[in-house]
Amino acid sequence: MPYALGGLATVENISLRCRRHNQYEAELVFGPRSFPEARGTVEAVASAATNFRLDCDGASSTSRPLGPPGS
């Protein structure tokens, strides 16, 4: 029984697969998925952690925070 369906997390029950073969096996068990991640297509979105900065000349730019959130 697959781990996702309540199977045991044992060496005998878990196998290492590449992403495509893992998706293939998942579709055999759960059926085809309709969301983009299942087809290998992921849309990038702006992170909430992105900071906006106004440079001295008035041009805006973005940068990533240098430390942990809230620092």
Image (tube, rainbow, N blue to C red):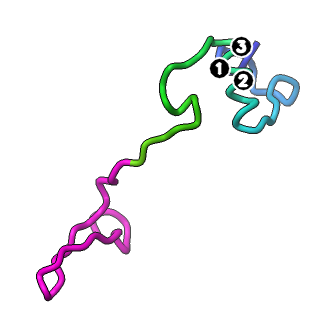
Secondary structure under tag 3 reads helix
Task: Kindly indicate whether the residue at mark 3 contacts the one at mark 2 (C-beta within 8 angstroms).
Answer: yes
Where does residue 52 sit, x and y in percent of width and height? 22, 68
Question: Could you give the CA–CA distance between mark 2 and mark 1, rounded to whole angstroms?
Answer: 15 Å
Q: From which residue to which does the magenta span run?
A: 45-71
Which quarter shows the N terminus?
top right
Crowding near pointer 3: few (<14 within 10 Å), some, many (20+)? few
Question: Could you give the CA–CA distance between mark 2 and mark 3, rounded to whole angstroms?
Answer: 6 Å
Q: Residue at x 55, y 19 (%)?
A: 33
User: Is 54 inside the magenta-drawn segment?
Assistant: yes
Q: Which residue is the site of mark 3?
A: 28
Relative side of 63 to 14, left or right: left
User: Is 66 inside the magenta-drawn segment?
Assistant: yes
**Compared with residue 70, is residue 53 higher up or lower down, i.e. above or below?**
below
Q: Which residue is the site of mark 1?
A: 4
Which quarter shows the C terminus?
bottom left
Where does residue 46 sit, x and y in percent of width and height? 33, 53
In which quadrant of the rendered view does residue 23 lie?
Answer: top right
Query: Which numbered disc flags the more N-terminal residue, 2 or 1?
Result: 1
Give the label, 1 or 3, closer to the camera.
Answer: 3
Q: Residue at x 30, y 62 (%)?
A: 50
Crowding near pointer 1: few (<14 within 10 Å), some, many (20+)? few
Q: Residue at x 43, y 42 (%)?
A: 43
Main SS, magenta region, reads loop
Q: Which residue is the site of mark 2?
A: 24
**Compared with residue 41, is residue 12 higher up or lower down, i.e. above or below?**
above
For the residue pair 20 and 65, the one nearer the viewer reads as 20
